Amino acid sequence: MSTETVNRGARKLRKGVVVSKSGAKTVKVAVSYREVHPVYGKVITRTKNYHAHDEADTAKVGDAVTIVETRPLSATKRWRIVAK
């Protein structure tokens, strides 16, 4: 194999709010986004919850955090916190 570095694909980033602290080093993050209804044209706010890994275990409910996609860490965790 060559000595040059292999670039990975761009990882998905999301910004959201911690809504639950569901165990040791795990938090639930709510990410909201707005989209236009396909038929009526009204702008709708949708929310999706992600389970994220918090290595330092410092995030509290209500904190604004940035999460990044990562390898599967458990049955439901595929994201980790990168910034508070």
Image: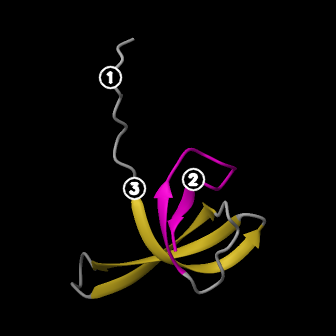
Is residue 17 a member of the stretch shown in magenta? no
Q: Which residue is mark 2?
A: 78
> What amino acid is at disc 3?
Lys
Checking the image for residue 12, the label placed there is 3
Q: Position of residue 39 (x, y in %)?
A: 23, 79
* In the displayed structure image, the side of residue 4 where residue 59 appears, left or right: right
Q: Earlier in the sequence, mark 3 or mark 2?
A: 3
> What amino acid is at disc 1?
Glu
The 10 Å Cα crowd at callout 2, few under 14, some 14 to 19, many 20 or more, is: some
In the image, is residue 65 above or below residue 11?
Answer: below
Alpha carbon separation for disc pair 2 and 1: 28 Å
Alpha carbon separation for disc pair 3 and 1: 24 Å
Q: How is the image coloured?
A: secondary structure
- Segment tinted magenta in the rendering: 64-84
Q: Earlier in the sequence, mark 2 or mark 1?
A: 1
Alpha carbon separation for disc pair 3 and 2: 11 Å
Q: Secondary structure at mark 3?
A: loop
Q: Which residue is mark 1?
A: 4
Q: Are marks 2 and 1 in contact (CB under 8 Å)?
A: no
Q: Position of residue 32 (x, y in %)?
A: 43, 79
Q: Are marks 3 and 1 in contact (CB under 8 Å)?
A: no
* In the displayed structure image, the side of residue 16 where residue 8 appears, left or right: left
Q: Quick one: which residue is furthest to the left in this view?
A: 41
| Image label count | 3
Q: Residue at point 72% right, 63% down?
A: 25
